[in-house]
Image (cartoon, helix red, strand yellow):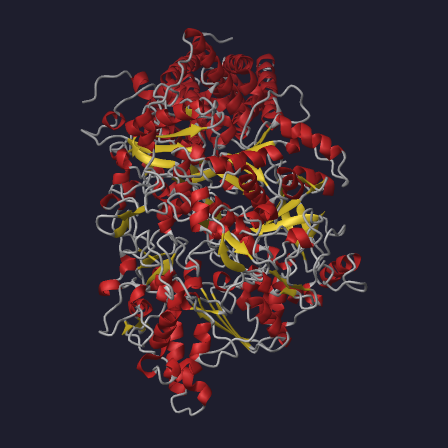
Amino acid sequence: MVEHRSLTERLSGPLADVADDAGYSEPPPRMGFFTDTSVCIGCKACEVACKEWNDVPEDGIKLLGSSYDNTGQLGASTWRHVKFIEQPIYVPERHDQLAADLGQAPTQSTPSTQDEAGVRWLMASDVCKHCTHAACLDVCPTGALIRTETATVVVQPDVCNGCGYCVTACPYGVIDIREGDGRAFKCTLCYDRTGAGLMPACATACPTESIQYGPLDELRERANARVTQLQLEGETQAQLYNERPDDGVGGAGAFFLLLDKPEVYGFPPDPVVTTRDIRKMWGYLAGAAAAVAAGVVGTLIGGGP
Amino acid sequence: MAENHPVAFQWVVEAKLRGAEIIDVDPRFTRTSALANRYVSIRAGTDIAFLGGVINYVLSRGLEFREYVVNYTNAAMLVGEDFQDTEDLDGLFSGWDEQAGNYDASSWQLTGERDDTLEHPRCVFQVLRRHFARYTPEMVERVCGVPPADFTAIAESMTRNSGRDRTTAIVYSLGWTQHTIGVQNIRAASILQLLLGNMGRTGGGILALRGHASIQGSTDVPTLFDLLPGYLPMPHVGQDDFDTYVAGGQLPAGFWGDFRSYAVSLQKAWFGDAATAENDWYFDRMPRISTDHGTYRTVLDQIEGRCKGYFLVGENPAVGSANAKLQRMALANLDWLVVRDLQLIESATFWRDAPEIETGELRTTEIGTEVFFLPAAAHTEKDGTFTNTQRMLQWHHKAIEPPEDARSDLWFYYHLGRRIRQKLADSTDPRDRPLLDLTWDYPEEGPVAEPSAEAVLREINGTGPDGRTLSVSTQLRDDGSTRCGVWIYCGSYAEEVNQTARRKPWTEQNWVAGEWGWVWPNNRRILYNRASADPAGRPWSERKAYVWWDEEQGRWTGHDIPDFEASKPPTYVPPAGARGPAALAGTDAFIMRGDGKAALFLPKGLADGRFSTLVGLADGPMPTHYEPAESPVANQAYGRQSNPVARRYPRPDNLYNPPRSEVFPYVYTTYRLTEHHTAGGMSRTLPYLAELQPEFFCEVSPALAAERGLEHMGWATIISARAAIEARVLVTRRMNPLRVEGRIVHQVGLPYHWGQRGVSTGDSANDLLSMALDPNTLIQESKVATCDIQPGRRPRGPALVEFVRSYQRRAGLIDGSGNGEADHG
Amino acid sequence: MNSAAGNSASGNSRQPEFESYYGRPVLKAPTWKSPDVPLYLFLGGLSGSSSILAAAADLTGRLALARVGRVTAGVGIAGSVLALVHDLGRPARFVNMLRVFKPTSPLSMGSWTLAVYGPLAGAAAASEVLGVARGLGRLAGLGAAALGPVMSTYTAVLIADSAVPAWHEAHPEMPFMFGGSAMASAAGVALIAAPIAETGGVAHMALVGAGMELASSQEMERRLGLVGEPYRKGRSGGWMWTAQALTGLGALTALVGRRSRVASAAGGVLLAAGSLSLRYGVYLAGVESARDPKYTVVPQRERADARAAASAEAEPAPTPQVTRHRRVLWVHGAHEARDGHRHRAFRRR
């Protein structure tokens, strides 16, 4: 069923039939996550459920001081990560009134004016994006990283030799080498659950359906409706992230509804799969290799003093 | 709610997505606030002033649901002429006895007359209107620190969303109960919801979120010292025979009129055939209480050497209870201690690692307590029920055998009882009779002889003369022909089927989903749901139809099971001399009340004992704003600073910070985080949870941080008259300084999960707290108190003790005037 | 302060404003260890260019020079492979590199190249050192030389095919930089070890290599702008500066002193050291550019904003409209939602 595509086309841009492209004949629909951060309550049930199900080890008991986030980042031993962002909101009338009051306060309190503004607390559960064009998979030299029949991206721990190439390739900083183990690990989208008809552990545990699992087409439809609704309600910054098939990774199997710019959540604002440029890179290599050959031969055989 | 009940919060999120407006009022900005449409920061401990403001907003604008109020509440009843309000007595109700420190409540009575126009100056409605007139938006601002615009927006939203077609629900948790005015906080909410017609109706109500799974169950089948199962009062010294006991609990009308049936059936469940009318149902086998045996009094009794043995079951007072240091000192003064828990908690290891060992106040070699640690089975390792906040019993099946020596609580108590009875089998001592006469014959199952939990539930449900299970509590009789362990749970094993194990999907039944689990009483999902229909029995509106009177069938019907006698028509008028349920009219929706009316004004009750609806409240018939036991500001409403009848235990090891003390200028509030469970025994020990909140921290506003020189991620020492603890500092805008009484009040947030054991350790916030209790429930005031906060870590060793003493000295609590009794005025 | 927003680095007024999550990196820094990977990059290039040098020497009858080239290539590739294997999380699974053949993975292609080149270069070197099977050794050396240009440059593609900003964005120049550096290092080692009589042209080879390296690195730094900053600043910038100084000085010394054994050797040392420094500099610049979210966020934000501006110019954003059923779709528990709620079919267990 695979129609003929140029290498460039297969390495970036929209790709409707990802599993097909990966060689599965008549694969099931592409499955993925839609994480609607506007209803995330930061309970971290996803983090715990993920670790319980996948037997992911503890990842450091350390206070980070970044609001209620003591996880820090995704990694080999953290496959779901709930981010917490506290943002000041300026409430003019409140501010003016209290600023005046604070001037006469009997205590020695001298809060800065912005302290009297409101606050909003953004929470978002991050996860592997299961990119349409997954750089980790593209660069893996052992074939440990594979595309599954539902178009998710999974590491085979019995194949991985821990070369770490995927770590440098991921534009989201997701996959990492587990210390003490040496191999790369990341979210499997609960391949062992979904194959048995179960939802991934995180989506199952999520109480508010901030994490939704399902056929990607359906999730996209739902997400677009939701973002439109939020914008109509005045959430002007509401936006979908990683949802568009024409973005730098060809759209992702795990996409998000955000209430602020992606970088506020620690996401790259415009990620591009590095292998989009691989043909050009090989081209430059050919040029450089030729130059080297010519240079050596020219100086040692052709030219000389 | 999102913070501590994230699973239940899904329904709030869903309601929001369907257009509900979510309002969150909390001293700190929580995960709930993050999702709310409107968040208002309130000074801890001022909820009555806030709710009083909304009540006043309703009453002063005539926004009450008049037809509901007149028919279903006691608004029309006249209050006795002797009654005087806090408005007349500057913060006291009539009957105050300064010497005794409590009220003679005899003047808090209704006369039995009514005025349906609600115009009579002594009718409850008018008394209420005058009582709450003081709580203007300006007063709310002065007391709570809530700007009038925010307050008015909330009051407007609540009233707009209440009435025939709409309802508003109030959800509260321990933020309301853990105060010296805890019960009155909830009373204030009740009054508001009754005035707005939001009780007994779908989408309305007051939803109490409990502190743990099945805490509702442990009040229903109580672990409380003064209650028997089903809210029957515990016998008191002086109640020498069964009739006297029944007279103390029986109401002339309503379902408490059948008190005798409940009590006799309970005696029969416990003593079986041996309990007969002739031997007064073995009432002499029942223990009696004489005084306060609450947990805090018990702790003091331990320190004073009067209580020598202690069972701690799933409880970690060395971390989790107020004035935790005193709790540890008490544990160290016992002869024996049994701890049943999943982990070796601080309360089991205090003898070697309590903070007092380091300060030199305790020495391991001098502690005589013999500690027995018995590992407990987790809920997945045993059969049983959880009773949730909706009064719903849900059966859980054992998934795996408990590991090694771990045993269920049921196993433990059953076999403990069995062995004690074996040892006493030959005893002739009359004091052993209660134990020996108990029915103690549950079938045992499996390799460890686990008693059958289903058999226990069956006993709780009760059986009739034929030995088969009863279906409904109205089948209970006072002639000894029925047995029932918990009268309100009667029906949970109806038809010999474990009704609590039902799991019919919502897709296969109506939206009330009455076939999921089982709800007391009699599987009614909303209490007092007769009030969802108008006096004539018609739904208030089509949109809010829930139960209604079906004239053709001559029955109440609807989506839920009516919480009313099914065939009693709305037009029913009780004949003279009627008693019990028959004495209630067809419009008396509040069937547990003696007059069938919900209490806006709660008169002194007819019964003895403690429990509220039967006996009235110790601190007044209507809620009144008092400052917390410890507060940096003066009461703006009355001369009385704090609840005059709050239970206090002034002693050198339980000193109270003086009110408005410059030494303790800040308010702190304790709470829980999503990531941990209460005193941490179930979460600090688990890496997956500990890594999510790895250290004890305090939350302060940027303004307070600037004022005290606190650095984000640095250390702070927090000091009260009881203790000094250290915590990492999180400076956050989620903590908001409030303007109160013309000054800025700073609030410090303290999650209380930590102790010295587990994967994540830290000081215990509860060390700071005093024992200052609500007079009705004896629940400690842990949601608000005062403190000082300083940058840096606390002193260590004996220097810590001296450090706290220096604060006590500066506050004039020792070597000076007060001894913790500074505040009664 | 407990805030996620705005972290313009303090004390530097010229830092661009950008937003990040508590200043944390967006990317994972390469897990590749030092000195394993810089050595791997250096030795691979040295080896590849040495093979070409050896073949050229062979073809021009300079046997001592050819010997030096073959031995260098053989030792270099052995060291390179050792460094690579040592860097693996599971070294025993090195052979898994040959499970697949993947043009999108430079490491896969590199491994296959290495799998062919390594034995050839090794055989050539062994033949030289042991003095056996000279004919076959010579053939192996020529074979290795055929792959030499790729060996000299492929590690550039290896690191450029990554999300690391300073590496990926440099992909047009990186092969020339590495290739030039490889030439310079091979020439350098030859100048150190080969008799002066046979090193004719080697200094020129160094000069061409150095010129290629310096020109391409200058062009790269000029073109990259902000992302190129780690090549100019900090520890990585220091290595880069050192590399360029050593390479330039080495090439000049070799050229000017090409008739002097001592000067040639000194130039050779400088060239080899310069080449190694370059690999350290590039390695560290990559790590730094991954660690600081600035290098990820700023260029991507500019790109995204430019695209948004362009598309807004092309067609104004449509007014958002919501259709009723869409919302119901999302809400679960509603009976109407059945169609839109297929994920409910997955059991929550």
Q: Is residue B294 above or below residue B93?
A: below
Q: Residue at x 74, y 35 (%)?
A: A110
Left or right: C342, with B170 as reference point: left
Instruction: Decide which of A245, B608 is in the foreground and name it.
Output: B608
Residue B740 sits in quarter: top right
Q: Is residue B496 above or below residue B3?
A: below
Does residue B149 show up?
yes
Q: If the image is split into quadrants, where does the C terminus of chain B sit?
A: bottom right
Left or right: B13, with B183 as reference point: left
Q: Is residue B280 above or below residue B16?
A: below
Does residue B690 show up?
no
Going by the picture, which residue comes out furthest to the right?
B816
Instruction: Decide which of B425, C262 is in the foreground and name it.
Output: B425
Q: Residue at x 42, y 13 (%)?
A: C317
Left or right: B411, with C308 as reference point: left
* Residue B742 on image: x %, y %: 72, 39
Q: How many marks overall?
A: 0
Q: Residue at x 58, y 47 (%)?
A: B47
* Residue B458 on image: x %, y %: 29, 68
* Residue A34 on image: x %, y %: 36, 32
Instruction: Decide which of B512, B14 is in the foreground and name it.
Output: B512
* Residue B815 on image: x %, y %: 81, 64
